[in-house]
């Protein structure tokens, strides 16, 4: 069976899923919908689509009789709900980029539509599908660590990634996209629920925008990096970040692809002179946090702490798991295990998960993009949700924790879930 796919939203995520699906010959892209003519034409050319298979918006595609087995919905976050409901009603299997929706009522509309129509449904929680996570889940499933007592989990966003996506970029402003915990870290909350396999019962959270604020602007800084007297010494120089991408195909795809499609020095400079990505990071309309912690208590007594911070290199997540019979810590590539068992006190092993890919979008999120896509194709081929290991209700569960954590942060309270 060759799975046929329509792509709604031909930006970076839509391209990534389309390439992952078609790379092994198991799927074929048969339609694209995107209001941007350049993005639409680029994806159409890559997958050999005729003009009649190209649509200016999801509604035009949904108005046609069903023409694919599945649809990838990779529109901006606040444009997920209506196409997801419409395509579920048309009987399409759906791969929906995270987050599901900006609010709980909208996410519940999607879940209701999926369950009403009985369609295969996946959310882009790619961390579940990396070789590293599969190895860690196998370790925990073996019982080697005993009962999980607590978990520490770190998301190192990366200083330049924060500046690119969450200060200058599309996810900088909560009113336009959503809070950082939803747009970036719903991955991690979902992952913690997946790893711990228990129901969270209470949550607290603290976080704020600590650095990317007007009062931290260096003396003499200009409005744009291209004309700034102190740009050469600034860690967040847009000139250095984006001009250094030139010549590297992966970096030209991301992050540079979000800035300009003209991958030349002249094209990048023009974009920085005129577009949002050339702005001083201390002079943007950003308001999402640049650091946040979330504390969770689970029904069986385990606790988890999650830290998201901008002020790191962009790397794989770091995790420590404290069990009654052993300890494990992982860095996205390897897992160090320390056994407490009699006869081998303190015995150590390092598990190599054979993860070679990096943590960024350009690197496929450590194999998670491919892993999710292949699991989705398995589910579509089988007409069964099981290969995905999670359903719409499971995806919603992590989102509910995110929204509760945000309420806890805003009210400085501990909330029952």
Image (cartoon, helix red, strand yellow):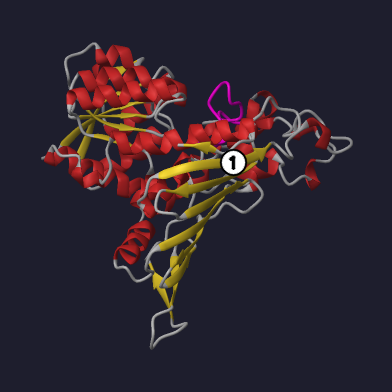
User: Which one is nearer the viewer's eye here, 359 or 388?
Assistant: 388
- Disc 1 crowd, CA 10 A, few/some/many (<14, 14-19, 20+): many
Instruction: Indicate left or right for 223 with 85 as reference.
Output: right
Task: Tell me where residue 209 appears, x and y as whole percent.
Answer: 69, 36
- Residue 109: name its quadrant: top left
Whether residue 12 is visible, yes or no, is: no
Task: Tell me where residue 265 appears, x and y as whole percent.
Answer: 63, 38
Query: Chief secondary structure of the magenta span?
Result: loop
Q: Relative to 160, does residue 71 appear above or below in the rendering?
A: above
The part of the chain drawn in magenta is 169-183
Residue lying farthest to the bottom in this orientation: 343
Q: Relative to 138, does residue 44 appear above or below in the rendering?
A: above
Return the residue at label 1: 205
Q: Relative to 79, does residue 255 appear above or below in the rendering?
A: below
Task: Tell me where residue 306 appears, x and y as whole percent.
Answer: 54, 49
Residue lying farthest to the right in this orientation: 219
- Residue 46: name its quadrant: top left
At a point 32% along the width and 48% down the height, the residue shown is 370
Q: Does the magenta run of residues contain 177?
A: yes
Q: Relative to 99, does residue 155 appear above or below in the rendering?
A: below
At a point 40% along the width and 47% down the height, the residue shown is 193
User: Which one is nearer the viewer's eye here, 190 or 221?
Assistant: 190
Task: Tell me where residue 79 appears, x and y as whole percent.
Answer: 42, 20
- Residue 212: name its quadrant: top right
Whether residue 346 is visible, yes or no, is: yes
The N terminus: image quadrant? top left
The C terminus: image quadrant? top left
At a point 53% along the width and 25% down the height, the residue shown is 177
* Mark 1: secondary structure: strand
At a point 63% along the width and 41% down the height, the residue shown is 206
């Amino acid at each position: 069976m060759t799975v046929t796919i329509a792509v709604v939203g031909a930006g970076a995520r839509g391209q990534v899923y389309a390439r992952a699906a078609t790379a092994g010959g198991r799927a074929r892209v048969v339609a694209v919908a995107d209001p941007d003519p350049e993005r639409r034409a680029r994806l159409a050319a890559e997958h050999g689509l005729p003009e009649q298979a190209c649509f200016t918006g999801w509604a035009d595609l949904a108005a046609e009789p069903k023409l694919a087995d599945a649809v990838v919905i990779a529109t901006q976050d606040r444009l997920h709900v209506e196409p997801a409901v419409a395509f579920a009603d048309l009987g399409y299997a759906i791969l929906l980029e995270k987050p599901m929706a900006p609010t709980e009522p909208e996410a519940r509309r999607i879940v209701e539509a999926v369950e009403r129509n009985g369609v295969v449904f996946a959310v882009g929680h790619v961390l579940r599908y990396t070789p590293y996570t599969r190895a860690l889940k196998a370790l925990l499933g073996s019982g080697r660590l005993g009962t999980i007592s607590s978990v520490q989990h770190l998301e190192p966003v990366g200083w330049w990634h924060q500046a690119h996506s969450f200060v200058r970029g599309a996810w900088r402003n909560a009113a336009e996209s959503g809070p950082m915990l939803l747009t970036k870290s719903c991955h991690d909350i979902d992952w913690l629920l997946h790893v711990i396999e228990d129901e969270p019962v209470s949550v607290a959270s603290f976080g704020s925008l600590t650095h990317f604020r007007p009062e931290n602007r260096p003396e003499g800084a200009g409005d744009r990096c291209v004309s700034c007297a102190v740009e050469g010494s600034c860690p967040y120089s847009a000139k250095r970040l984006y001009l250094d991408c030139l010549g590297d195909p992966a970096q030209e795809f991301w992050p540079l692809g979000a800035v300009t499609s003209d991958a030349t020095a002249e094209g990048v400079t023009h974009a920085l002179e005129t577009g949002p990505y050339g702005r001083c990071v201390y002079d943007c309309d950003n308001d999402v946090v640049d650091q946040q912690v979330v504390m969770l208590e689970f029904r069986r007594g385990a606790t988890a702490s999650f830290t998201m911070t901008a002020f790191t290199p962009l790397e794989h997540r770091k995790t420590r798991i404290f069990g009654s019979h052993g300890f494990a810590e992982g860095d996205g590539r390897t897992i160090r295990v320390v056994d407490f068992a009699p006869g081998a006190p303190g015995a150590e092993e390092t598990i190599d998960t054979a993860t070679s890919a990096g943590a960024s979008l350009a690197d496929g999120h450590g194999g998670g993009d491919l892993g999710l896509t292949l699991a989705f194709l398995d589910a579509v081929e089988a007409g069964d949700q099981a290969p995905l290991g999670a359903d719409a209700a499971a995806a919603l569960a992590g989102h509910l924790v995110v929204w509760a954590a945000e309420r806890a942060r805003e009210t400085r309270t501990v909330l029952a879930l």
